[in-house]
Image (cartoon, rainbow, N blue to C red):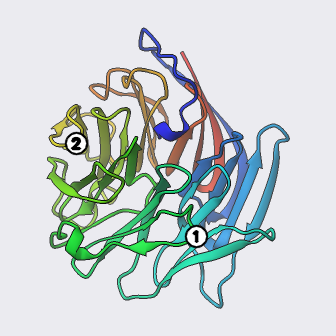
Amino acid sequence: MLLFSCGKKEANVPRNISEVKIETLLEDSLLSIRAIEILNDKSLAFASNKGVFGLYSSKRELWQKSVQKYDSVDLHFRAVTHTSGDFFMLSIDNPALLYKTGSHGKMELVYKEAKEGVFYDSMTFWNDEEGIAIGDPTDGCMSIIITRDSGNIWKKISCNDLPKAKSGEAAFAASDTNIAIVGNKIWVATGGKASRVLYSPDKGKTWQVFDTPIIQGKETTGMYSIDFYDELNGFAIGGDYTKPDNNNANKMRTNDGGKTWEIVADGKAPGYRSCVQYIPNRRGEELVVVGFKGIDYSNDSGESWKHLSDEGFYTIRFLNDSVAYTAGKGRISKLTFRE
């Protein structure tokens, strides 16, 4: 996401990346890791199933892992974020439990929602004070909670102030990339039987909704991931994870801030992918997508794609324009992209 881009200098010519080096940093066959975050000091934080969360220091090449417990609940974290001073992680399912860094070396519970149908998918911050998390519909609209005090208190937005959800519309907790933020603006990707973009220009105070042409109509179809390079240019990917080789109408982009979208590379690889990220400082022309079927790269804003690896991952975050961290089933890895 742009929040973690390194530097401001823009490249002049798109590269032609031809290979990726994959270095495993953490391996644990019991973990399914879909939420990772690069912190301000360039360390890597993650949270996963079995209540496991941890921190990796690249300078010391050292892992610190812990297990979060709450009664007899089998905690599964698929959303994480951070401010300059705190780390946050949010569990899926009922009850939803949101933790932040505590003052005594332990994570502190700052939000709990116990309700049938509750299922949170993704979260992020605009700045050190204001943050947001989104989840599947309850009471007829997408679940959205917001903090305005650095994550100490979270409040749920009333459905009276949000667009109504369509029948079968939800979101996917596949990679913690259902949300994209640039400045005060936010875009939220929904999926399922209906796949639309919720948009707020003012940090979640008011909301609009835009239709999209991406594949939809089944519970397993739609957008799985969205990213914006700037206030106008964005990209989304998804498909149907039960038919991962299907590459029809599963990739789309916008150049007007998400109001309208066009399908790109229709009928061409890649098929289903769970995460897309713009490579920082490459003028919005270079993107990488990952999924359990592999890693793919584009240097023409998604018009065409090169398959770099069959290695499967769920999510990816860039440290700079050549190095990224990625996570998936049983592992976290470091990726180095080369021309």
Q: Amino acid at mark 1?
A: Asn
Tell me if 248 is positioned left or right of 130 in this view.
left
Q: Considering the numbered disc 2 on the image, is that residue within a helix, a strand or a loop?
A: loop
Give the camera-side residue of 133 and 325: 133
| Residue at mark 2 | 258
Q: Which one is in front in this view, the residue at disc 1 or the one at disc 2? A: 1
| Residue 198, image quadrant | bottom left
Point out residue 164 in the picture as x, y percentages from the top left corner.
17, 70
| Residue 100, image quadrant | bottom right
Q: Is residue 312 visible?
A: no
Q: Is residue 32 above or below residue 177?
A: below
Residue at 61 percent of width and 71 percent of height: 99
Q: Is residue 118 above or below residue 333?
A: below
Q: Residues within 10 Å of mark 2 (few under 14, many from 20)?
A: many
Give the camera-side residue of 35 and 297: 35
User: Residue furthest toward the top?
Assistant: 12
Quarter of the image with the C terminus is top right
Q: Is residue 274 above or below residue 173?
A: above
First in sequence, mark 1 or 2: give its number: 1
Point out residue 39 in the picture as x, y percentages from the top left corner.
65, 46
